[in-house]
Amino acid sequence: MRVICLPTKDRHITDMNEKILAELRNELNVQTAQLPWTELERWFASGGVIRVANELDLIDVAARIAADDKPSIEQWMAAGLIGKVMDNQAAVWLSQNSVLWTVVVKPWILVQQEKILPTGKPV
């Protein structure tokens, strides 16, 4: 294992960033709610709904967007893990009367399907 020691100034900035991210996560966690897709359709129509893949933590993604963490956001977008909700996905959620986890990071509403365990129970 290779250990990289950051100069004191860079380490301080990293510590500050992690503190800010932790505070954002706490604040956003309280604001997270489950909403039916039908209540999100008008924001979808205006292009304001972002899908977050189940592989990612919804609150962490929201905090990093709020903190303008461009490298993480670009990496997730390139991997297809976050992005605007497409028409075909919206149609599926509508037909299934889906309820999604949501959190607002203006001007976006981030959504994520409920995670299901292999046993079929929600996480």
Image: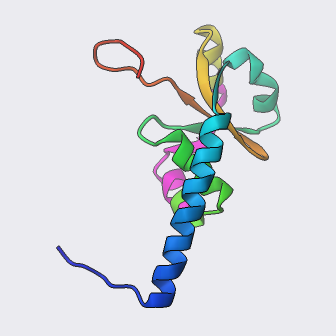
Q: Is residue 39 left or right of residue 111?
A: right
Q: Is residue 75 magenta?
A: yes
Q: How is the image coloured?
A: rainbow
**Residue 13: % across, % down:** 54, 78
Residue 43 sits above or below residue 76 on the image:
above
Q: Which quarter of the rendered picture does the N terminus lie within?
A: bottom left
109 relative to 66, above or below: above
Which image quarter is the C terminus in?
top left
Magenta segment: does it hold 7?
Answer: no
Measured as percent of width and height from the top left, residue 87 is found at 67, 27
Residue at 54% over, 55% down: 22
Residue drawn at (60%, 62%), measured in percent from left and top?
20
Q: Quadrant of residue 100?
A: top right
- In front: 13, or 96? 13
What residue sits 60% from the left and 55% below the top? 23
Seen at 43% across and 25% down, the residue is 115
Look at the image and give the residue range highlighted in magenta: 74-88
Tell me where residue 51 sits by quadrant. Answer: top right
Q: Does 107 appear above or below 111?
A: below
